[in-house]
Amino acid sequence: MPPNPAGPRLSIVTITYRDPAGFRRTVDSLRQLEGAGIDWEHVVVESPSDAPSVKAILPPSWPLRFVSSPPLGTYRAQNLGLETSCGRVIWFLNGGDELAGAAALKRALVKIESHPVAVAYCGAVDLMRDGRFLYRQVPRDPVWKNLLGKNALCHQGVLYRREAFSRFGEYDPEYRIGADYEHHFRILAKGGEFLVGEEDIGRFDMSGASSNYRAAFREFRAIQKKHLPQLPIVLRLLNSIYFPYCYSQVATLKFLGALPFSGFLRAIWIRWKRGFGGSRG
């Protein structure tokens, strides 16, 4: 997929299947870009049967590039949207995800465009549940701190240059949960550079997020075994310590979440995350 200098500045790729309410939230948030001075297109991948309802949500002037496809799975569909897009910068904002603010997105675009060596900009994401703000997750710098042990990068906060895919390949759909994690690890292992910042550009509603943490960590482990040998021994040693810690932490949180007083514990956890645990915004 070669770069396309004649394309728009930004391609926003949205995968949505049978979720008109989630897609509407995404579109409503993107209305902030009307008159914001960003040359953009919206690449929407949807099943043929849902095409009429999706198009009915969009105003006539919407910069739409529509892709009709049977269900492929998230990452195959994202690859399809990527291959259809023409923008110089790619942002995956799937159905139900939202733009947090047009001004922050513009600042993030300027930052990645000002650093031609970087293939991706990693910014902050507001984590939501049922439409309610939980806390802001801000990536750590350097980027490897977000990849050791588990995946701590939300794709809703990552802007990619097209080179991130033309040089390092597309998402590997072998991984059903962690293909974005594998892609980031692949870029890091092959010497690609990330730009890490704190611009709050996306919102991720975790209401429908997978609760199968065991499957997720199996994929994380497989991805680490694949790419860690290409990284310095210090990072390999750190990962060997941090991986079981992350797994134990998530397993404990899942166990506590099933207890009768989990609501009280969840409120404490969210308060702590807002104050200390990864939220610096």
Image (cartoon, rainbow, N blue to C red):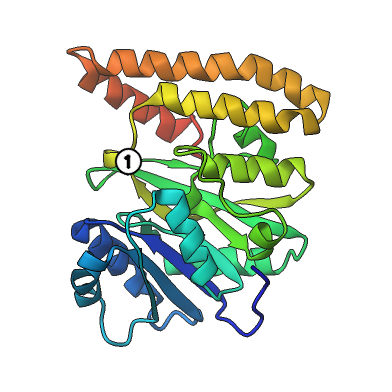
Q: Is residue 41 above or below residue 153?
A: below
Q: Is residue 178 left or right of residue 22?
A: right
- Residue 73 locus on image (x, y percent): 39, 49
- Residue 213 locus on image (x, y percent): 41, 24
Tell which of 162 and 28 is nearer to you. Answer: 162
Tell which of 181 and 218 is nearer to you. Answer: 218
Q: Residue type at mark 1: give it.
A: Met
Q: Is residue 96 left or right of residue 7?
A: left
Q: Is residue 45 left or right of residue 240?
A: left
Q: Is residue 131 above or below residue 84?
A: above
Instruction: Please tell me which residue is depicted at 57% across the width and 77% down the height of the picture.
Output: 9
Q: Is residue 206 above or below residue 99?
A: above
Instruction: Please tell me which residue is depicted at 39% across the width and 13% down the height of the picture.
Output: 252
- Residue 119 locus on image (x, y percent): 69, 58
Query: On the image, numbered disc 1 is attached to which residue?
Result: 206
Instruction: Please tell me which residue is depicted at 27% across the width and 86% down the height of the picture.
Output: 60
Tell which of 23 and 106 is nearer to you. Answer: 23
